[in-house]
Image (cartoon, rainbow, N blue to C red):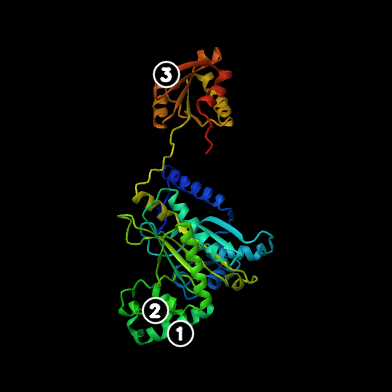
Amino acid sequence: MNMKAPRGTVDILPGEAKKWQFVENKIKHVCDRFHFEEIRTPMFEHTELFQRGVGDSTDIVQKEMYTFEDRGGRSLTLRPEGTASVTRAFVENKLYGDPSQPVKLYYFGQMFRYERPQKGRMRQLNQFGVEVLGSADPAVDAEVIDLAMSCYQEMGLKSLKLVINSLGDKESRTNHREALVEHFKPHKEELCADCQLRLTQNPLRILDCKKDRDHPAMKTAPSVLEYLNEESRDYFDQVKNYLDSMGISYEIDPNLVRGLDYYNHTAFEIMSEAKGFGAITTLAGGGRYNGLVEELGGPATPGIGFGMGLERFLMALEAENVDFSIDEKLDCYLVAVGEKAEKEAVRLVHELRKNGVQTDKDYQDRKMKAQFKAADRYKAKYVLILGEDELENQVITVKEMETGKQEELPLNRLIDTLKEKLPGGREE
C-alpha cells in the first residue's frame, strides 16, 4: 500500500505554512490598495470550459489536464489555470451588468497540471492571479503589471526582469500567422511532432516550443512587431509610455507569446535573475485577452490578467535571502501544578484567548520542569505559573522569559496587565 503523497504534490508543514501566510497577506494588502476584490471559483469545472477558453491546441488541454467523468457521465476537469474559471464566473453571474466597471478581481487557488515535477513546478500548484474585465484602456495593462511588480518588490525582491511584447489585434495576428506558416513550412519535417501540428493549428505557439527553441529557423522567424497595424502599435506605445511614467523598467521580447490561445495585444512575464534561482526563471506571466468573454457566451468585454506561482515566489525569496521577519514567539504559556489549578487553567486560557492573547498550556500531564521546557520550545514571551497556593490566594506568577523577571499579580488584573505588555495583541 502506497501511503505517500502523490508524485508532484507536497505537504506544507506548519513552519513553512507561516511563510506562505506571510506572503499571501502581503499580496492581499497590495490588492486592497489597488482596489481589487477577491473571487473564489470551484476547483473543478466542465472540461469544455478549458477546451474553449484555454484552447484545444495548447499543451495544457492536449497533455496536462486532470480530466475525469463523474457519476452522471459529465466530463469534469481540475482547473489547470485561473482565467477561464474567473471569466466563466463573470459571465454566469452577469458581473458585466455591475455599474462599477471595470470589474477588478484577484484569487488564490490550487491548479492542477500533469507535468514532469521539478522544484517550484508541481502537479498541484498554488497560484495567485488577477483579472480585470471591462476596460480596453492601455493604462489598465500598466496597472496590472504594476500590481504584479509591487507584490514582488514589497516582499524585498530586487533581481527582477520584466519582459513585454504585443501580439496585436486580430488583424495583426492573422497577418503574422500567415508569415509564420510561410517561414516554417520549408522546415516542417525538422520540427518536433508538436510543432508540426502547431504549424496548421496555431503557428504562434511554435515560438514557445522548448524542444525546437535552438532550431536556426527560430532565430530568423518573422517578429509579430513587424506585423502590428497602426492601432496595435499605438496601443503598445501607450502601454510602454505608462510604464515609463511609473518608472517601471522593461525589456521588449518579440518572441514572448505566452502558452495560452486567448492572449492578444499586451503579453508580459516577470523573471528572477537571482543567482542560483534555477534554469526556469519565470515567476509570473499574463496579458490581455479581448474576446475570451464572448467565447464563453458573454457580451463583448475586454480583459487582462496574470498568474503568479506562489512556490516560485517563495523560491525567489529564498534565492535572494529575504528575511521574512515572522514573529514565531508564543505570547504566553500557562504552567499549572495541581488538580484544581489544572481545571482553572482551562478557563483562564479560554479567557486570555478571548481577549486577544495568544496562549497555550500543557495537555500531557507533565511535571512543572517539563512544562517550562515546552514553554522554551514555543519561545513563549511570558510564562504564567498557577499552583494550588496561588489559586487559593487568587494570584498568578508572571515570568518574562527574556529577562527572567517575575511578578505576582491578582488573577483579576492578569488580562489587563498582559494587554499592556503585549500592545495590539496578535493583530497584524
User: Disc 3 marks which residue?
Assistant: 405
Residue 178 image label: 1
Is residue 410 found left or right of 226 in the rendered image? right
Q: For label 3, count other residues whose C-alpha is less than 10 Å away and answer few (under 14), some (14-19) or many (20+).
A: few
State the image coordinates of residue 21 (x, y, percent, origin top left). Answer: 48, 46
Whole-percent x, y for residue 210 in the image:
35, 71
- On the question of residue 402 being in view, the answer is yes
Badge 1 local density, few (<14 within 10 Å), some, or many (20+)?
few
**Residue that label 2 marks:** 195
Between residues 8 and 356, which one lies in front from this camera angle? 356
Question: In the depicted view, which residue is nearer to us: 233 or 412?
Answer: 233
Look at label 2 and name its amino acid.
Answer: Cys
Q: Secondary structure at mark 2?
A: helix
Mark 3 touches mark 2? (CB < 8 Å): no
Q: Secondary structure at mark 3?
A: loop
C-alpha distance separating marks 2 and 1:
15 Å
Quick check: can you spot residue 1? no
Label 3 vs label 2: CA separation?
A: 72 Å
